[in-house]
Image (spheres, rainbow, N blue to C red):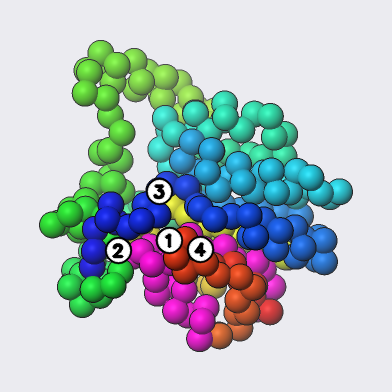
């Protein structure tokens, strides 16, 4: 695999979204999407804001729920998205941490990245260690100890009222599965396939929309291959260079 930092569209945000947002609006007008569930908010200025603005011009605006595991990112996202009353930033993990760690340890693509020369990956010479550290929550601390003490104080204060726990992708999918939801998968690079499998498991034969980001990355290259092969999915629009795919389960 190739380092993701060498990718021309290396970014935490989706790119080339003009035609995609029009397609999303078109599908919404035909089928009245009432619920949107996104994994991976970051600070709310990327795909989340794009979705908020895309739906915000419509007659019937769906409720958007966006999941972010990192507390500091979630706090920034709450502030950055406060103008959109229909967007709900949720602090918590899309999957079980234990399930995610076990998935990463067994993932053949992470263990043998050289078998996939055209796919991008994070973590330099040791992607396994990188992704396990990411899932353990080791990233995101300040180099200044005083700031870390302060952040930890605020984090524990927020935890009482705002932390929603783990395995939230299954939780919200079970709530929305009968609402023909739109699911946007854009969280940690190591668990894209795990999230995709959870979506298929919970949704079963129910119809839904699916937007994948980073289809040329470890995150979703296998999910994208499955979309292309059919399996009940119909691709609506794809930008392979930008790295996203919009599909529906029919």
Q: Is the residue 153 above or below the residue 136 in the image?
A: above
233 on left or right of 10? right
Instruction: Tell me which segment is drawn in magenta.
Output: 203-229
First of labels 2, 4 by sequence position: 2
182 on left or right of 220? right
Task: Name the secondary structure under disc 2.
Answer: strand
Query: Residue 123 at x, y = what percent?
Result: 21, 53
Q: Which residue is mark 2?
A: 120
- Residue placed at 25% from the left, 13% from the top? 146
The alpha-carbon separation of the residues under discs 2 and 3 comes to 12 Å
Q: Which residue is mark 4?
A: 244
First of labels 1, 3 by sequence position: 3
**Quadrant position of the C terminus in the picture:** bottom right
Query: Residue 185 at x, y = what percent?
Result: 51, 58
Query: Residue 44 at x, y = what percent?
Result: 54, 38
Q: Which residue is mark 1?
A: 214
Please tell me whether residue 88 belongs to the stretch shown in magenta.
no
| Residue placed most toward the observer, 60 or 15 | 15
Q: Which residue is mark 3?
A: 11
Image marks 4 and 1: residues in contact by CB distance under 8 Å = yes
First of labels 4, 1 by sequence position: 1
């Amino acid at each position: 695999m190739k380092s993701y930092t060498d990718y021309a569209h290396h970014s935490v945000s989706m790119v080339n979204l003009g035609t995609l947002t029009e397609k999303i609006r078109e599908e919404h007008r035909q089928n009245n999407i009432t619920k949107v569930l996104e994994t991976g908010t970051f600070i709310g200025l990327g795909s989340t804001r794009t979705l908020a603005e895309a739906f915000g011009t419509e007659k019937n605006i769906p409720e958007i729920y966006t999941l972010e595991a990192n507390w500091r990112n979630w706090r920034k996202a709450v502030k950055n998205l406060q103008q959109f009353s229909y967007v709900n930033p949720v602090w918590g993990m899309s999957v079980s941490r234990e399930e995610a760690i076990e998935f990463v340890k067994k993932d053949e693509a992470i263990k043998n990245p050289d078998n996939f020369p055209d796919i991008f990956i994070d973590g330099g010479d040791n992607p396994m260690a990188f992704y396990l550290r990411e899932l353990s929550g080791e990233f995101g601390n300040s180099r200044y100890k005083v700031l870390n003490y302060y952040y930890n104080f605020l984090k524990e204060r927020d935890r009482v009222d705002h932390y929603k726990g783990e395995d939230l992708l299954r939780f919200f999918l079970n709530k929305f599965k009968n609402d023909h939801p739109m699911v946007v998968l854009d969280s940690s690079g190591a668990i894209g396939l795990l999230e995709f499998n959870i979506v298929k498991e919970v949704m079963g034969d129910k119809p839904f929309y699916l937007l994948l980001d980073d289809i040329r990355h470890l995150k979703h290259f296998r999910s994208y291959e499955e979309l292309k092969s059919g399996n009940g999915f119909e691709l609506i629009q794809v930008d392979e260079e930008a790295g996203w795919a919009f599909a529906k389960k029919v």
